[in-house]
Image (spheres, rainbow, N blue to C red):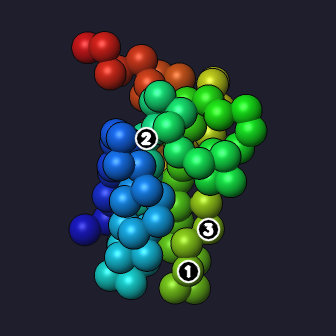
Amino acid sequence: MKLAIEVVSTNWQDDYLMKVGEYELMGIPEYWIVDYLGLGGRRLIGNPKQPTLSVYQLVDGEYQVTLLTGNERIESSAFPELQLSAAEIFAAKTI
């Protein structure tokens, strides 16, 4: 598996705290957390809380995270040709 994606719900702690560690141990190269409601803790998504796409990429066996909001473009090693912003991902929830 090259990529795992989780959409945050009210049990956001599972996605940010438990699954990050599990996927890192399994060696999943990339993990996205789509938090379109901004439910995650402030230390995880920033302050003020807002819709955030967290892109975790495995570097030397450990995840490095990039937080994306608004029109910031996603840089994905799993899909290098991807041309989407965080806002476009969040907008897809209404489709």
> Which numbered disc, 2 or 3, marks the residue closer to the eye?
2
Determine the secondary structure under disc 3: strand
Q: Is residue 57 visible?
A: yes
Judging by the rendered image, the residue that carries numbered circle 1 is 62
Looking at the image, is 93 positioned above or below residue 77? above
- Per the rendering, the mark at residue 19 is none
Left or right of residue 10: residue 56? right
Looking at the image, is 10 positioned above or below residue 77? above
Q: Are marks 3 and 1 in contact (CB under 8 Å)?
A: yes
- The quadrant of the picture occupied by the N terminus is bottom left
Q: Are marks 1 and 2 in contact (CB under 8 Å)?
A: no
What residue type is disc 2 on?
Val
What residue type is disc 1 on?
Glu
Residue at 32% x, 22% y: name it: 93
Residue at 32% x, 81% y: name it: 26
Left or right of residue 71: residue 83? left
Judging by the rendered image, the residue that carries numbered circle 3 is 64
State the separation of the CA atoms marked 2 and 3. 16 Å
Q: Residues within 10 Å of mark 2 (few under 14, many from 20)?
A: many
Residue 24 drawn at (x, y percent): 43, 77
* Residue closest to the eye, 23 or 2: 23
* Residue closest to the eye, 45 or 62: 45
Q: Residues within 10 Å of mark 1 (few under 14, many from 20)?
A: some
Left or right of residue 20: residue 1? left
- The quadrant of the picture occupied by the C terminus is top left
Of callouts 1 and 2, which one flags the residue occurring earlier in the amino acid sequence?
A: 2
Determine the secondary structure under disc 2: strand
What residue type is disc 3 on?
Gln
State the separation of the CA atoms marked 3 and 1. 7 Å
Judging by the rendered image, the residue that carries numbered circle 2 is 34
Residue 36 drawn at (x, y percent): 46, 30
